[in-house]
Image (cartoon, rainbow, N blue to C red):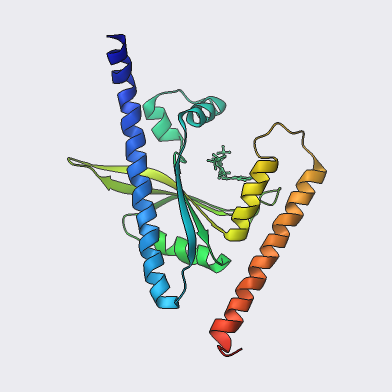
Amino acid sequence: KISSMVRKSIQPYKELMSYYSCAMMEVEMKFKVLSEELSMRDDRNPIESIRTRLKTPESIREKMVRKGYPLTVESIEENLHDIAGVRVICSFPSDIYTLAEALLKQDDVRLIEKKDYIKHPKANGYRSLHLIVEIPIFLHDHKKTMKVEVQLRTISMDWWASLEQTIRYKKDLPDSDFIEKELNECAEMGAAMDARMERLYGMVWEGNRDL
Ligand code: 0O2
């Protein structure tokens, strides 16, 4: 009896997570379609890889408590915008903006929020383009609109973010100007390499192909 009560009470949460999972698949597919089309056009793939993730129950709980929201299914859906996440790793910085623009032009995609941490990097050097979008998912008897967080970054931005997380992110380290300065310098080196590689690509492919 108790177990059936528990099952019943977590059912709405499980349903919500499954809707997020569907929305995440929709967005992933949109990028796969764009990748296919742009690869035909340019003879190269602007997307290196796509990763998806659903926020874990512990992480949802921690964020709700930290932000002071009530722990209900309705409140989770209303207040958390990053339960479904799609991370798109691009070859060059310009690919990020081409892909973001192509996604946002689609008539079933609505932009809720954009944070450009490439034009405005975080103090530690973090770079990525973040979009919160809303897209419809079509269920057997109704349509539901869900939010998905899209993070677009280059390989070098991803490499930095992944190592920075290993080194520091969310660990209770004291604020250290030294660590922040080091991280920032590494991020700037990454950005300089991105710009240099993109310039090289432009010289080879858009200038003289016989270089
Ligand atoms: P995970 O494991 O990637 O899901 P908040 O979520 O409250 O911290 P906000 O404003 O909702 O803040 O989010 P923001 O800053 O737009 O982006 C949050 C996400 O971006 C993080 O998700 C990370 O994925 C990434 N991110 C932001 N800043 C940094 C950073 O300094 N270093 C690294 N490595 N990643 C960062 P989660 O949920 O924290 O983690």
- Residue at x 36% of width, y 35% of height: 17
Q: Nearer the viewer, residue 126 or 14?
A: 14
Depicted 176 relative to depicted 36: above or below: above
Residue at the far left: name it.
141
Where residue 198 appears, as percent x and y from the top left, is: 60, 73
Horizontal side of 205 relative to 121 (left or right) equals: left
Where residue 8 appears, as percent x and y from the top left, is: 28, 19
Q: Can you tell me which quadrant of the image ligand 1 is in?
A: top right
Horizontal side of 28 relative to 139 (left or right) equals: right
Residue at the far top: name it.
1
- Residue at x 46% of width, y 29% of height: 57
Horizontal side of 122 relative to 92 (left or right) equals: right
Q: How many marks?
A: 0
Where residue 116 appears, as percent x and y from the top left, is: 57, 55
Q: Nearer the viewer, residue 163 or 64?
A: 163
- Residue at x 61% of width, y 83% of height: 203
Q: Is residue 118 visible?
A: no
Q: Nearer the viewer, residue 91 or 132?
A: 91
Residue at the far right: name it.
178
Horizontal side of 180 relative to 157 (left or right) equals: right
- The quarter in which the N terminus is drawn is top left
Q: Is residue 140 visible?
A: yes
Depicted 40 relative to depicted 25: above or below: below
Q: Nearer the viewer, residue 132 or 33?
A: 33
Depicted 92 relative to depicted 43: above or below: above
- The quarter in which the C terminus is drawn is bottom right
- Residue at x 45% of width, y 34% of height: 79
